[in-house]
Image (cartoon, rainbow, N blue to C red):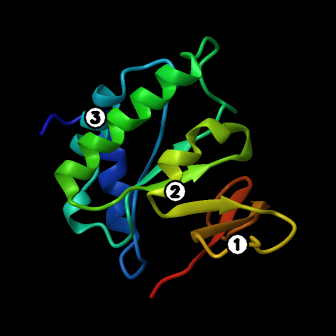
Amino acid sequence: KKTTKKTRTYRNHYKTLRGLDVGAYHFFTFCTDGQQQAEHFLATVDYENSDLPLALDLEFGGNCKNPFSEEKIVAEVQSFLNTVEARTNEKTLLYVLEDLEFLNEIAEERPVWRRSIFRKPGNDNWLVWQFSGISKVDGIEGPVDLNVFKKS
């Protein structure tokens, strides 16, 4: 595997988290080829030893200034998912915000990571629930997201 600074950083962080369930997620870029993003993600993370499902973060906030059309985004997200899921033989966890309704069909087929700050999500189709985006955790500078993982 090609080693980059980000790959080394990921591996160093992974080693420091012994005793915790560890996973990885990819922030999807809406103006870049989905398969290329998937190949980079799979080359960076240790998906074979992941405790949690691999996750794909889909949101416009913080994304590229000139995104693809909705149809092209759907196609590139599907390409990413096809590549990752073929390699891992597992469904990818999707973090999808409400402004991406055009991705609902893809999300219906996979576990979902719901962001609901004020109350527990009303439906049962979530695996992870983000309930805060401004928490503090000892040892981490700045605000931290907190989540609940519904593990069987």
Tag 1: residue type? Asn
Density class for disc 1 (Cα within 10 Å; few <14, some 14-19, many ≥20) is few
Residue 132 in which image quadrant: bottom right
Density class for disc 2 (Cα within 10 Å; few <14, some 14-19, many ≥20) is few
Q: Residue at x 64, y 14 (%)?
A: 65
Mark closest to the chain's N terminus, 2 or 1: 2
Under circle 1, the secondary element is: loop
Q: Decide which of 145, 4 is in the foreground and name it.
A: 145
Mark 2 vs mark 3, CA separation in Å: 25 Å
Mark closest to the chain's N terminus, 2 or 3: 3
Q: Which quadrant does the N terminus fall into?
A: top left
Q: Residue at x 73, y 38 (%)?
A: 99
Residue 96 picture location, percent across and down = 61, 48
Residue named by callout 2: 108
Q: Residue at x 73, y 53 (%)?
A: 142
Density class for disc 3 (Cα within 10 Å; few <14, some 14-19, many ≥20) is some
Mark 2 vs mark 1, CA separation in Å: 13 Å
Mark 1 vs mark 3, CA separation in Å: 33 Å
Q: Is residue 85 above or below residue 111?
A: above
Cβ atoms at labels 1 and 3 below 8 Å apart: no
Q: Tag on residue 40?
A: 3
State which mark lies toward you, 1 or 3.
Answer: 1
Tag 3: residue type? His
- Furthest toward the left, the residue is 1
Residue named by callout 1: 123
Residue 48 in which image quadrant: bottom left
Horizontal side of 93 relative to 10 (left or right) equals right
Q: Which quadrant does the C terminus fall into?
A: bottom left
Residue 35 picture location, percent across and down = 29, 29
